[in-house]
Amino acid sequence: MHIINPIIFSYKIGAITLTLHWYGVLVMLGVATGAWVADRLVTRLGEDGERIWDSMLWVVPAGIVGARLWYVVNATLGGSTHYTAQPLKILLITEGGLHFYGGLLFGAVALFIYMRKNHLDPWLFLDVIAPVTLLGQALARPANFINQELYGPPTTLPWGIPIDADHRVGAYSNLNIFPVETTRFHPTFAYEMLWNFLAFGLIIYLWRKFPEKAKPGTVFFGWLVLAGAGRFWIEFFRPDQPKIGDFWMTTTQLVALLMAVCGGLLLAARLGWVKLPFKLNIPNRYFISLKKN
């Protein structure tokens, strides 16, 4: 039984069926809201907010492709044959299955190309877009609840959620041990959603509270710390993620840990708390529209 039907509506025109999924709607809500907030932040810093909307034409398609590919590769490395046996399933992103890090990687590459092409300050855009990814991701997370994915191990906590038999993973598909009627699971997606809201709010608060310390790069490095630390913790509630060989850590946890550690070191160096063996070649102020057209 689905608590909420993943399909909002479906309409058939001849041989073609048009279907609107909650997953797509909520993902695009997160993208649009994040872009709107980024527009406001960029404008406050003296840059043209329209640049954000223009860059979305590059970043969003690249991010979706990257998020899907990372998810598929991650699932396949974990032993799943779902996509190798049915390659066309790779295209069905409405069924769920986007990985944040893949979207982040491909989206960042697309953003870098856009900035180089338009002669824009990369540090300004990194500082603006990094925290709003937390907001956009948080707004899209309820889609995981609707699709019954990104849940954790069984729990007796009052906020545990039911999961249908056909959405169970691993040992949890044994209904004799984990009956559908009585077994509840950790809502991992909700934990990440709450963390992202808190992290986004903290970054924006500190940015506005201490503007004199917010040199180019500090917000981005702070985002690396919070986004990495949050995901590292969340991964302990993800039984569907492949481990690194026989090690307890998942591949996503390793990436998250590297993000947090590197971000912490770079942030400490940027604020003058520590000295690194190499020099951070970052300007002390933003260069708005490095080259006006």
Image (cartoon, helix red, strand yellow):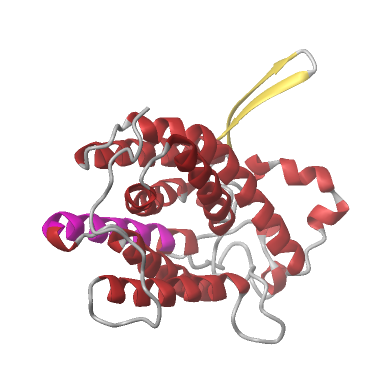
Indicate left or right for 2 with 171 as reference: left
Q: Is residue 291 above or below residue 141?
A: above
**Residue 91 location, x and y as percent?**
73, 41
Q: Which residue is drawn at 18% across and 61% down?
A: 206
Q: Residue at x 64, y 44 (%)?
A: 65
Indicate left or right for 268 with 101 as reference: left
| Residue 82 figure quarter | bottom right
- Residue 126 in sight: yes
Magenta residues, dominant SS class: helix
180, 67: nearer the viewer = 67
Indicate left or right for 5 with 95 as reference: left
> In the image as oriented, which residue stretches furthest toward the top?
14
Q: In this view, does 13 lie above or below 186?
A: above
The residue segment tinted magenta is 192-211
Quarter placement of the C terminus: top left
183, 43: nearer the viewer = 43
**Residue 75 location, x and y as percent?**
71, 62
Q: Residue at x 36, y 64 (%)?
A: 281
**Residue 59 location, x and y as percent?**
51, 40
Q: Is residue 34 covered in magenta?
A: no
52, 217: nearer the viewer = 217
Q: Residue at x 56, y 51 (%)?
A: 103
